[in-house]
Image: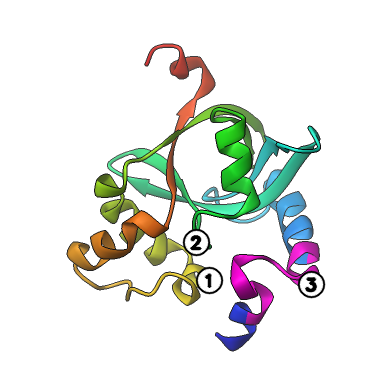
Amino acid sequence: MAVRRWLYRGGRPNRLARGADRLTAALFARGAGPDHLVALEVRGRRSGHTVGLPLVVAEVHGERYLVSMLGEHVNWVRNVRAAEGEAVLRHGRREEVHLDEVAPEQRAPVLKAYVGRAPNARTHIPVDKDAPLREFARVAPRYPVFRVVPRHSAADR
């Protein structure tokens, strides 16, 4: 656990974590690992270049979600907001998606599912994976959650 915290001290990846994230994103994009391990690609808000990183998809009631285990101020969250939710998920294939931000009062079930699926997140989200939903609701405002909507369906919203 101490190594995981060191890799993301201050809520930002250090050089080693950034390198590992690039490698992992490339592997996930090619389809390595289970389907819930994806590479998120989003346009950088400053550079305009596509930025990719590995994420874990949480699933609740047949809906897919992305969670920021490091909170509000990470680059991918800022980039998704600047891109108005337009992004790409890759896991062996390219899927254009729209990411709809979930209101804090609706995040608890997603956070619980996410912590159960993403063991590394347990270092950063201070709630036991078996805790009741009210404990997840208590910390939910600190962890952005985005519902994954296939782009062709985004126009139907």
Q: Which residue is mark 3?
A: 16
Asked if the residues shown at circle 2 and circle 1 are in contact, with their CB atoms under 8 angstroms apart, the answer is yes
Q: Position of residue 25 (x, y in %)?
A: 71, 52
Which is more toward the observer, 45 or 137? 45
Q: Which residue is mark 1?
A: 120
Density class for disc 1 (Cα within 10 Å; few <14, some 14-19, many ≥20) is some
Residue located 64% across and 84% down the image: 3
Density class for disc 3 (Cα within 10 Å; few <14, some 14-19, many ≥20) is few
**Amino acid type shown at disc 2:** Met
Q: Position of residue 41 (x, y in %)?
A: 68, 39
Residue, far top: 156
| 7 in magenta | yes
* Whole-number angstrom distance, CA of label 2 to CA of label 3: 18 Å
Residue located 49% across and 76% down the image: 123
Q: Give the position of the C terminus as an image quadrant.
A: top left
**Amino acid type shown at disc 3:** Leu
Q: For the residue labelled by badge 1, is the local secondary structure a helix, a strand or a loop?
A: helix
When the figure is inspected, residue 127 is found, relative to residue 144, above or below; the finding is below
Density class for disc 2 (Cα within 10 Å; few <14, some 14-19, many ≥20) is many
